[in-house]
Image (cartoon, rainbow, N blue to C red):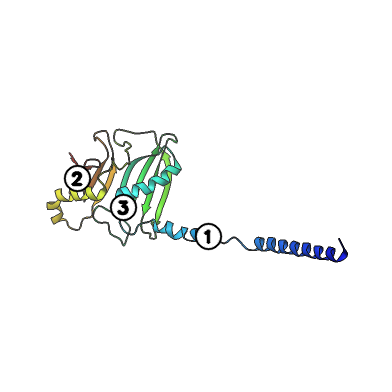
Amino acid sequence: MDSRRLRIALINVAVMLAFMAALALTSCSQPPQPSSEAKTASPAKEAAIPAGPVTGKTALWVMAKSAHTWARDMTPLTLKSGSVPGTKNEGGKAVMWTATFGSAGKHEARTFTFATVGSADVTKGVTIGKGLPWSGPSSDVMPFQATDADLAVDSDAAFQTASTLAEKWLKQHADKEAAISLGNAARFPGAVWYVHWGDQKTGFAVLVNAKTGVVQK
């Protein structure tokens, strides 16, 4: 190889090395840009929280996902509707629900709250409470299944059934808002919705089987 060709080869090598160095410097100095899919991840996650009141089964399933992360053997024990100042529950739906799950493996029970709106005292989304010792099911509080078949009757349908039975009472107490809970006990064939207005002495309450929709006595 003559001197002229050698100089050209050396120049090409130098140019290539300079290009590679610049490329490496650029990749280190600039953070990787998120893909279009990553950019839309946060809005999609936020949109997963419905606006306004939701049924009990909808809220229970949302909380069950978080509970499964806490304990793979988790099982639902209770579910109760709640309220947030400045909002209104209606038609058997609520803006806030609280569920209690038990774990036999952890010997622990833990409460989870799901709210579709936030306030000074309520956090929007799922909130996980502290764990408490749990020795297992009792005759008054028994686990229940949260499948579509076992909860074929949702809180809104149970509310409609209860409202029909409470129609006369509600005409005289139109200002009373219903409180709804879901649970199981030895005296029931499965999980039941407990829909009640007012207090135990002067209120009105109805028990509705969550699987069949039959009113429990």
**Seen from this angle, which residue lies furthest right?**
3
C-alpha distance separating marks 2 and 3: 18 Å
According to the picture, the residue beneath numbered tag 1 turns out to be 35
Find residue 32 and report its image quarter: bottom right
Q: What residue do we see at 44% from left, 60% from top?
A: 43
Query: Of the residues under marks 1 and 2, which one precedes in the sequence?
Result: 1
Q: Are marks 2 and 3 in contact (CB under 8 Å)?
A: no
Q: Is residue 205 left or right of residue 56?
A: left
Q: Position of residue 103 (x, y in %)?
A: 41, 37
Crowd rating for badge 1 (residues with CA inside 10 Å; few <14, some 14–19, many 20+): few
| Relative depth, front residue between 172 and 89 | 89
Secondary structure beneath dot 3 equals strand
Sequence-wise first label, 2 or 3: 3
Q: Is residue 161 left or right of residue 17?
A: left
Say which residue appears at 42% left-offset and 42% top-offset. Answer: 68
The image quadrant where one finds the N terminus is bottom right
Q: Return the residue found at the far front.
A: 1
The disc at residue 82 is: 3
Instruction: State how far apart marks 1 and 3 are (Cα).
Output: 40 Å
Q: Amino acid at mark 3?
A: Gly
Mark carried by residue 18:
none
Q: Residue at x 17, y 57 (%)?
A: 174
Q: Is 86 situated left or right of 30 in this image?
A: left
Q: Give the alpha-carbon distance from disc 1 to disc 2, as whole Å.
A: 53 Å
Say which residue label 2 marks.
Answer: 206
